[in-house]
Each structure stands twice: as C-alpha cells, then as structure tokens.
Amino acid sequence: MIGSENSAPQIPRENALRDYRIVCRSRQASILGRAEVFAGKAKFGIFGDGKEVPQLAMAAAFRKGDFRAGYYRDQTFMFAKGMLTVEAFFAQLYAHADLEAEPASAGRAMTGHFGTRLLNDDGSWKDLLAEHNSSSDISPTGAQMPRLVGLAYASVLYRNLEALREFSRGFSNNGNEIAFGTIGNASCAEGIFWESVNAAGVLQAPLVLSIWDDGYGISVPNQFQMTKGDISRVLEGFQRRAGEQSGIDIYSVRGWDYPRLCEIYLEAADKARRNHTPAVIHVTELTQPFGHSTSGSHQRYKTAERLQWEKDNDCLLKMRTWILAQSLASVDELDRLEEEEKTGVIAARDRAWDAFREEIDRERTDLLAIPAETAPSPDAEEEIGRIRGRIAEAPHPFRRELLAAAEEILLELRETDTPVRRRIIKWKGRVLQACSGRYSSDLYCENGRSALAVPEIPAVYSPDAPTVGGYDMLNSYFDAAFARFPRLVAMGEDVGQLGGVNQGFANLQNKYGALRVTDTGIREATILGQAIGMAMRGLKPIAEIQYLDYILYALQIMSDDLATMRWRTRGGQMAPLVIRTRGHRLEGIWHSGSQMAGLIHLLRGVYVCVPRDCTQAAGFYNTLLLSDDPGIVVEVLNGYRRKERVPDNLAEFTIPLGVPEVIREGTDVTVATYGACCLIALEAAALLARAGIEIEVVDVRTLLPFDRHGMLLESLKKTGRILFVDEDVPGGASAYMLQQVLEKQGGFRWLDSPPRTVTGTEHRPAYGSDGDYFSKPNRETIFEAVYGMMHEADPIRFPLFYR
C-alpha cells in the first residue's frame, strides 16, 4: 500500500494558484449555501467543505470520455472540470425547475446531486468522448457503487470485442476510459460497497475509487463503522501483489497533502487506463468544517480537541500554507485571490436567486393583477383582501403558496360566475400545466425511441412451423438476437458455461464469447448495477436475475437508480437495459414468490412485462431491445417445457406494451389476469362452460404500462362483471388492476355485479404440489369465484352446488 511520505513532484505556480482559486470558490459556495438554507431561501443543504483539495487531484487525472459515479460532496471536482458552475450550484440549492439554470436535474434533486447531460435534446446520445461525464447522483449511501462497476466494465468490452469497433464512435476510444467513483468512509461499512469492490476486482474493471474519510458517519466515528476503524486495513486482502494479475491497487494518502495527492491520482489513473486494473484511494485526515449538513451541528458529538484538530488540519489552510512555503505566492496575493472568489460566489448566488425568482414573481404579479371585485358577502370580501395581502407581502413565496391562495379566493367566489373568477381559474390552469412538465415529465422515454412507439410486428407462422419446448424457443431467440444486435450482452449467475438454469442461453457463450454471455458471482445488486453502467455507455445489456424472488437483492438499485434515472435528470440520462427473470408456480417459499405489487409500485420508470409463455417473452424482448426504455420481463417458470410453435419471424416480431390480448372470448364475466395464471384461467373457463357460463379471459400482458387503450373496459361493457386473478398477495397487483379499470378507465359505471379478486394467500407458498395448490389461485378457486358472481345475479339458473 502506497502511503503519503514519499517525495512529490513540483507543481507550477499557475497550476497551484488556479487550483487554490477553485477550492476557495467551492468553500465559499458551501458557506453561502448554508446561509441560504438558514435564511429560509432553500430547504436543505449538504456540501463538500473539507473535501476540496483531494478533489482537485482527482480532477487532474480525469479526462474527456471518463465517467464519474459519486456522491453528494463532490462539488469541487465538478467545478474543477467545468461540469458545474457556481450559478448552477445555487440553482440546484433553490430547486430551480429549469434545465438552462440547473442542467443536472432541473430542480428535481437536492443540492450536491450532480450529473452531466449525456443525451441531446432529441434523446440521441451525445459524443461522450468529447465530454467530461458524470452519472447522476443519488442519495442512498453506497448506491452509486454498482453503477460504477458497469461504467468501468464497459471499457473492457470496448477494448476487447471486435464486434463493437464500428459502434464505439462517440462512446469509447479502444476502452481507454476509466470510471472515477467517490464514497464516504462510513458507507464503506455497507454490503453494497463490498459487493461492488469484489466485483471490480473479479472483472478487473478500470476504475479509480476515492474514499473520502473524515473519521465519521454523521455522528458515528470510524471505530464503530468497521473492524480496526480503518478501511485501508480491512481492504488489505484485495491488494494486488507484485506479479499478480488480479487484485486491486490500494493507496492511502492524507487529504491535505496537495502535491502527494496529485501524484497518486495521476499514477493510479494511468495504471487503470493502461492496464485495465481497479484502484482504491483512501483519502484520510479530511475534515468537515461545518458538520454533516444543515440539519445538525457537529459540535454536538465532536470533542473540543477534535474540533480544534479539524481547524488546524483544514485542507484549505494546509494548501495555503504549502503555497506560501513554496514561495508560489505572497500572503497579499492569496488574500486578494480569496476575496475575489468570495465576491464572485456572492454575485453568482445573487444571479441564481434572481433567475429562480423571476418567473415565480411574475406569476404572483399576474395573480395580483386580476382585479378584486365585490364578493358575495362582506365577510367574503374581507377574506379575499386578507388572502391577497398575505401573498403581496410574502418576501419570496413558492408556487404552492400562490396556488393555495388562488384556491382560497375561488372558494370565496364559489357562488358567482364572473370574469374575475374565470381569470383566476385560467391563471391556475396555466401554472398547473407548466408545473406538470417541470416535475412530472420524462419518467419514460418521450421521443421516437420510446418502447411505446415501437411498431407492432405480428408473429407469422408458416404451415410447417416447428413445435418446440419453451426453453428451445428462447434459446433460438437469443441466438438470433445476439446476431442481430452487436451491442447486446448478457450477464448473470450461470448464464455462460451452463447456459442458464433453464437453458435459455445454452451454447451461446461458445458461439459469441464470454464477454457477451458472461457468468457472474452471486451478486444481484451489482449484476443490475453493472448493466446500468454499461447501458449508460451505449451498450444493450440483459441483466439476468435467476429467480423473481432474488429481485429483492437488487430492488434498491432498481428503484432508486434505474427507475428514476431518466426522470431525475429530466431526460438527460438513460440506461436502456433489459432485466430478465422468471417466477410463479414453482414450489417452495423462496422460489415461487410473486412480488408484483412491489415491482409495479417501486419501479415506476421501468416497464414490467409478464408474458404467459416463451413466445410472448420473445416478442417483449424484441420490443424492448428496439427502444431506449428499461424493462423487466418475468418469464413463466413452468412454461419452459411447454410446447410452442416457433414464429417464422422470431427475431423480428414485436408485442406492443400496454395492449392486452383476449385469449378466450366470452359474454358473462371478464377475467383479467397475466403470466402463469392465464393457463389456469383457461382451464377454469372450460369447467365453467360445462356449467353454462362463458368467461372472457384477457391476458393484460404488461403491468407497466397497463391497458393503454381501455381494452378491459370494452370487455367489461360486454360482460358487466369482472374478476381479477393473480398470484400476488391480497390487495397486491390485483388491487392495482382493479383501480386501473374501475377508477382510471371508469369501469365502475358498467358493473352489474361487485368486482372481485382471486389472489395468492397472505403467506409465502408452501412446499410441494399441495402447498402450491393451497397457496396460489387454482382452477377451482377461479371457478367458484365466477360461479358465485353468476349465482348472485341469477340464483335459479346457477344454484350453489359446491357448499
């Protein structure tokens, strides 16, 4: 492990003073940012003070084409590389919902959450080799780590896959790009950190990870965070030894040692870039001069001795002392420089505030410009005057206060229909419409590359189309997909040499190579994160999660990172990957789960496809691979051995998302279901037909999106009755489907009987065939639910005979 005692290179005066300007600028931004929060002009602040100097060194090693996956204290680095202006920094602090002012998130992410725009306005990729790139930050501690693995590993593929050469323009220069990660010392205690570091070492992904160590995790010191209180010592087992091909280069350096920091970062980055090896730089003896955030004071948990040590070892003070000791500048020069930066930051703050307030203040002016009128009563007139006065006198009201005032005024005018009331309603409508775009756009792709815009290509069957098992169908499909899409790669547990536990990738590693069909360890979070990072660099990954139950291990990354990415960057970044998994009807507590309600509620921003067979799954894969949206396909476990006819256009046919399919027509009851339950519903339909009841079975096919064109409503209009069937717990996905049809589509108007659901039990499925039968919907439970509805409607014709 390299320490910080060796001699460091000389740094030119102009470089040192340029860097000192940047750290002074960043420190002033932190100081003034806190003041803005305490003045009530911003909601919350978390800043990078105390971490400034090492971030300069990281910036010196960072090149165009490289990527950053960091956390919310990296403002100095962003300033140093020109990826962030001081005005944009304050615009984010104020939550300015304007891309021009705040290009990282348009006010959707709180301060310290940085990112660059990887996409052009039309949704196409920028030339990432011409940019300094930063993936969009998220708050969950450590959650940037899985994505970091993928951002780095993409360089391995670009360097070693000949098939990617023609597709690498704008994405990679022979895999020479590296990914820089940052994380706080306390987050290194998390499992996701260790999973990611281990994955980076196994993959030999070219990354440089900085651990900013200020000795605390909010109030908890290192001694309670990790064994021996020192992350470098815990990481020693990963250290690459002389002559070894595997391992990680681990460095330790003090965070105030400016020349040594520069040397180590340049060395680590150069080795990672040339040799495709990962590095960890443990940056110690950092401080946090003003505490963790604006939510609390560090004086509450740090001793007087520690506070004094932090003052004496502040990296800015140390850098200033070093500059003076090296005779690179005089005291007066540095004083002037510091004052210039302070003045500049104040001016930038004021410009950002004025820009933030401009439109809101104009909307307030427009509201107050609507003339007052005689209200229906003196009391109402007095109340309207009070409301208008409150808004007029507020120093800097938010839109929520303006809209609240407008609503109160409309309440007082509810008994009148006057031009004034209509003008207020019109004003309110304009503001709400504009804010819908400000806060709710770009959850999914909204351009021509949307999965919803992929043209439907029906499956075509010749008279002699072969009939094969479902796993053979998927194996043939993936073979054709790898040949069709050179950027397509797949990774997951057992997908390589074995070809997948259900043989969907059988023999494809031999055909396409281990870099395109890759075995991984048992590490669901980083399988998903690896795919995210690769997709952000122009590749098209399939991340295989072996069973649906194992999604839980990756769910936080799927929800907090993948699902929010396009939205939290307001269309500036995307990760169009495909998640492949399988589930339902297998026997046992941990292999037959149906966490669908969890998925559809936690993964808004990811399309959720639930095919009933392997042919349908292939159609969904084709659709998703042609789009810029991420999606998950949940294959049916017991469908792999079921025989299916192979479409002639297996590699091309597509299934539209959000378009259900009627798989059995009927007139009495609509049964809405999906996945494995489709077959069971069809079995129940045959039994019900013997009782004189014809049900219409509708396969909803996708849960996100759900029935975009109201097909279920049309079926309900015909039958007057509806039953929702699925394997999730009571009130899970069945309640979601019910809400979509009855509330959103207005289906309650067409009900002749109360709607019903047939679901799984509240507990996990018990083992064995009987355990499955009594834990999940079956033919008999569907039969009795439908028959009971018809009995209520016509007890003479449909008498109860089973109880």
Image: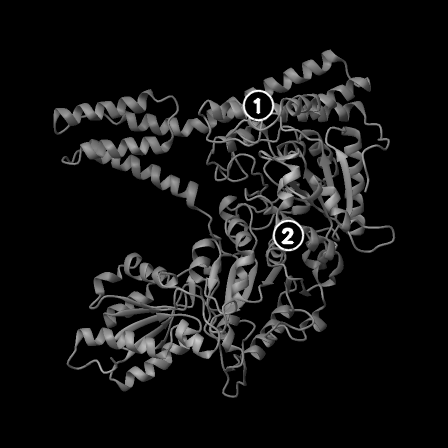
Crowd class of label 1 (few under 14; some 14 to 19; many from 20; radius 10 Å): some
Estimate the x, y position of residue 239 in percent, counting from the top left.
79, 49
**Quadrant of the image containing the N terminus:** top right
The correct choice, above or below, for 468 with respect to 104 in the image is below
Q: Is residue 623 visible?
A: no
Q: CA distance from mark 2 to mark 1?
A: 36 Å
Task: Give the residue drawn at x 66%, y 38%.
Answer: 223
Amino acid under label 2? Arg
User: Toward which corner of the image does residue 63 lie, by quadrant?
Assistant: top right
User: Toward which corner of the image does residue 795 lie, by quadrant?
Assistant: bottom left
Q: Which of the pair 546/304 is nearer the observer?
A: 304
| Numbered mark located on residue 31 in the image | 1
Query: Which residue in the structure is indicated by mark 2?
Result: 537
Residue 543 located left or right of residue 601: right
Q: Which of the pair 281/801 is nearer the observer?
A: 801
Task: Give the residue drawn at x 46%, y 50%.
Answer: 443
Task: Give the residue drawn at x 57%, y 51%.
Answer: 124
Q: Which of the pair 785/19 is nearer the observer?
A: 785
**Quadrant of the image containing the C terminus:** bottom left
Amino acid under label 1? Ile
Q: Quick one: which residue is furthest to the top in this view?
A: 332
Residue 328 located left or right of residue 689: right
Q: Judging from the image, what secondary structure is the residue with disc 2 in?
A: loop
Estimate the x, y position of residue 450 in percent, counting from the top left.
49, 57
Estimate the x, y position of residue 37 in percent, counting from the top left.
48, 26
